[in-house]
Image (cartoon, rainbow, N blue to C red):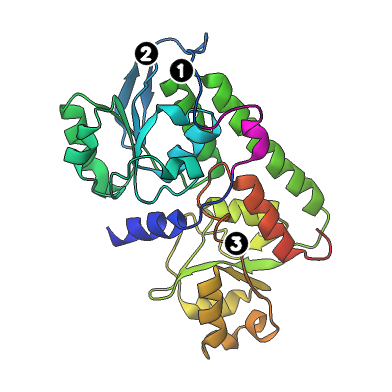
Amino acid sequence: MLSALRVLVLPLLLVGALVASAACGRDEGVRTVRASASSGAATLRDDFGDTVPVTRPFTRVVSLNPTTTEALFAMGAGALVIGRSHWDQWPAAAQRLPDLGPGIRPNLEIVLGTRPDLVLLYASADNRPAAARLRAAGVATYATRVDAIEQFRRTTRDLGRLIGDTAAARAVIDSVDRALAAVRVRTGTLPHPKVLLPTWDSPLLVIGGGSHLSELVEIAGGRNVYADEAAPSPQVAFEDVVRRDPDVILAGPEGRERILASPRWRTLRAVREGRVFAYDTMVVGRPSVTLGRAAENLAALLHPRGH
C-alpha cells in the first residue's frame, strides 16, 4: 500500500488549472449530455482488467480519482459528477461537490448512499475489493492508473464513451496535445541538460522513464537521467545518482529545501553550482488536463533565457 500511496498521494497535491481552450465556450458545471452518434453500445476494459458495459451514457458519476474528476470537468461534464474524494481539489466547482472521503479504500456505504450509476476509481491494488463490492451491488466501476501521457489520452477517450460525449473527450485531448507540441517546438533546438527528479527521501525514489514527468522533461528540453528505468518511480542508490551526475535537479519546494540543507546532496555538482529548482506543485503532477502548463513550467526552469 505504501508504494501506491507514494504514487497517488504525492501527485494529488499537485493540481493546477484547466487548459483553457479545452473548455472554451462551456460552462464547467452545467451542460446537457448528448450521446455521440459514434459511441453506441460498447464494452470497455479498465486497468483492473474488468469490463464495463456501456449500454447508455452514465449520468450519476462518483469520481474518486482526481485525474478523472479533472478530465470530466474539462469536458464540460461537471454536472454529472455527484461526489468526489477529498483529494479532488480542482476545479473550484469540484470542491462544491460532496466529499466522500479517501480515494484509496473508500467508505462504500457513503459512496453507495449517493446512488451512483458509475464509480471511477484509482487502479491501486488496495481498491480491488472496493471495485468488486461495488459491482456486486450493481454499480458499474471504471478503475484507471495514469502514469504516462498516452494513458491520459486513453482514459479521457474512455470517459467520453462512458458519458456519451466522445467529441468533448477528443477536444480535451487535442487541446493538451497542441499545448505540448508548442513547448516541444520552442525547446527542440536548445541544449538538453541531464535532469534528476527525486520524489522521496528514504528510500530514495526518483522519476523513471515510466512516468509522464520523464516525458514532460524531454518535451521541456531536458533528459531524465533515469529515463532508462522502466518504472514510474524506481528506488535507486545515492551513489548511482552521483555517478549519473545530473546537470539540474527538479523537485517540489519542500524537496528543494531538504536537498539544499543536506550535506550528502552537496556532493552533487548540480547542488554545489546552484542548479536545484522547484517546480510549481499546483501544476506539475499527474498526467491530466494540466499537462501543457506543466511542460511550460518545466521548460521555464530548464531554459530560463531561451524559453
Instruction: Report, in whole angstroms, how far the alpha carbon at label 3 lies from the one at label 1.
Output: 34 Å
On whether residue 10 falls in the magenta region, the answer is no
> In the picture provided, is 155 more to the left or to the right than 187?
left
> In the picture provided, is 293 more to the left or to the right than 57?
right
List the residue tagged with mark 3. Answer: 280
48, above or below 15, in the image: above
Of the two numbered discs 3 and 1 on the same chain, state the one appearing first in sequence: 1
List the residue tagged with mark 1. Answer: 164
Q: Quadrant of residue 180?
A: top right
Whole-percent x, y for residue 7 in the image: 40, 56
296, above or below 200, in the image: above
List the residue tagged with mark 2. Answer: 56
Q: Residue furthest bottom?
A: 263
What crowding class fits label 3: few (fewer than 14 Cα within 10 Å), some (14-19), or many (20 or more)? some
On whether residue 23 falls in the magenta region, the answer is yes
Highlighted magenta segment, given as a residue range: 18-28
Whole-percent x, y for residue 97 in the image: 38, 39
SS for dot 2: loop
The reply to whether dot 3 and dot 1 touch (C-beta < 8 Å) is no
Quarter of the image for the C terminus: give it: bottom right
What crowding class fits label 1: few (fewer than 14 Cα within 10 Å), some (14-19), or many (20 or more)? many
> In the picture provided, is 48 more to the left or to the right than 40?
left
